[in-house]
Image: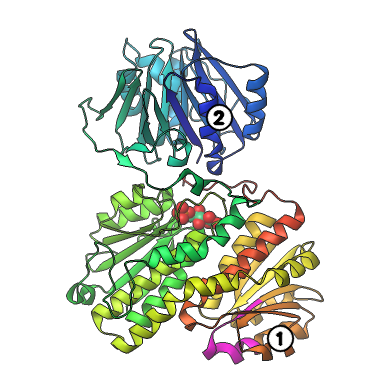
Amino acid sequence: MCGIVGYVGKKEASPVLINGLSKLEYRGYDSAGVAIIENNKLKISKCKGRLANLEAKLQQEPIHGAVGIGHTRWATHGEPSDLNSHPHSNEDETISVVHNGIIENYLHLREWLTSKGYKFMSETDTEVIPHLVDYYYQGNLEDAVMKAISKMDGSYALGVVSTHEPGKLVAVRKDSPLIVGVGKDEFFIASDIPAILNYTRDVYLLNDKEFVVITQDGIKLLTEEGDIINKDIFHVTWNADAAEKGGYEHFMIKEIHEQPKAIRDTMTSRIALEKPITLDKISLTKEQLENIDKVYIVACGTAYHAGVVGKYAIEQLARIPVEVDIASEFRYRNPIINEKTLMIVVSQSGETADTLAALREAKKHGARVIAVTNVVGSSASREAHDVLYTWAGPEIAVASTKAYTTQLIAMYIMALYFAEQKGTLSSERIEEIKKEMLQLPEKAEETLKHKDVLQRFASKTYMHKDMFFLGRGVDYAVAMEGSLKLKEISYIHSEAYAAGELKHGTIALIENGTVVIALATQDNLFEKMVSNIKEVKTRGANVLAFAFEGNNDIEKTVDSALYIPKTETVLAPVLSVIPLQLLAYYMAVQKGCDVDKPRNLAKSVTVE
Ligand code: F6R
């Protein structure tokens, strides 16, 4: 977690750093800080709370200088406080560091440095870094940083400045993202591209243990041995506006509305009528697919929920057994992986630590790995054998919406591709499903129109402390996602249940007025779902049901109903999740929650 930025140029660094940090608050926002070299002295300003606090502080006490680093924090080691905020410095404030990641052996390093006379001010793991750099400094900052990282275990993206060499910024990464922006007479480092898009579109994407040394004269990319690296510039084609709110009150509602386009973009050039499905550059022949005895889909959070739908789709359409795993569980349960395993990792950011660890574990055991990710050049995209991008555009709100629907599309495209290659479906059936998929953007647009029912329901129920989400088949997978959305942004406790499972215990919690959201889009399970709804209605539940248009009979059983356009049942999640996202959003707005930056969360979880 955490976001870092750095600047070397001719402008005042302070506003550039603040602007960059404002685009990275999705990575953490419990404190922020900058260190700028002013007249050969390090000036540091940092404080607990949102970036706005730091901005106010800098307005009161401005810092002038054209070289600096900045940080927005998501606390791991040490509570959010002024003292634990980054940047961290050595004792005489000649070296300052911003860090994203976790130094796993920091306690050992701290003890060792203490024995050498170094004093620590904070509870953070990061504070060992400026002291280590200080210990190794012998006239060259990059050499000292190289020696320091050779002692560090764990993950890091670092930006380091020093008054010993006041025009220089050194940065390096390992298992945490870092990009380098190249402008005209100015250079940047950042955890993510939106932080620098106001200044340049030309970036270098750093790999693990690659260093960048920036001065006013230019930049040098180095290996950890100090050898020069020649790299191509990556030109960002998407617009800075894509990362702005564009008139919406929150990024989340903007991103919910972007789903029809995101869905369309993710299908473009992959799905077309009467043409074979293409998976970009990925090729899996019939023989290769027949050699695969198991698919693992591994991911976290919302991406995991997309994986659960992926399991249903791949098993149903391509008849390949699929296991879906939560990445943090997968890596430690000694899973059975070999050359016959196909691993699909799903990650919006492509930087989630647990998902990357699972990817590496699978590769180590000979599996072929496909990454489904939204971020071009992300670690997942570079480390997997193959990559299938979701073209959702930048997702800024912490709560994932358009990334999820495009992940679903990626799952369907793969399932259909596998089915086509293996011949598990007739070509007519594949054409039927493709036809339905191509109509999803319009149907998603249609689904977005049902706001009034949801606003009304939210305004009546937002004070509730608990809610339940029920479904069967893929509706259950969507229920899990609806429940997560509600929890994370409105702080209402909720649980998702496979509707048939409720009566095995949890139904004891249903009482007069309990809110139940029931999904009933699966034709073959519709009657059974109606029976499950009756079970909770009889016990006093207040039920809002989602069904396909035409299934209006459901109104006889429930308190409120919302209809979504009819589509293939396996594709229903793309549409049924939209009202669930809207419902969570309206609940959170009613409660006055900070929708885009919910408490305790960060967009990119780069720690275990
Ligand atoms: C929830 C949410 C998280 C992420 C999870 C994985 O709205 O966004 O649950 O889905 O942290 O993140 P990625 O997809 O970046 O690996």
Residue 521 shown in magenta: yes
Q: How many marks?
A: 2
Residue drawn at the location 68% of the way across and 68% of the way down: 451
Q: Is residue 454 above or below residue 383?
A: below
Determine whether the residue tagged by mark 2 lies in a helix, strand or loop.
helix
Decide which of tag 2 and tag 1 comes sooner along the chain: 2
How crowded pointer 2 is (Cα within 10 Å; few <14, some 14-19, many 20+) is rated as: many
Between 458 and 78, the one lying in front of the other is: 458
Q: Residue at x 69, y 56 (%)?
A: 490
Which SS type dominates the magenta stretch? helix
Q: Identify the residue at image location x=27%, y=63%.
A: 280
Q: Is residue 577 above or below residue 436?
A: above
Q: Height in image: 88 above or below 271?
A: above
Horizontal and vertical percent for residue 276?
Answer: 26, 76
Task: Residue 383: give x, y in percent of width and height.
Answer: 29, 50
For residue 589, which quarter of the picture?
Answer: bottom right
Confirm whether residue 163 shows in the render: yes
Amino acid found under the numbered disc labelled 1: Glu
Q: Which residue is label 2 attached to?
A: 18
Element assignment for label 1: helix
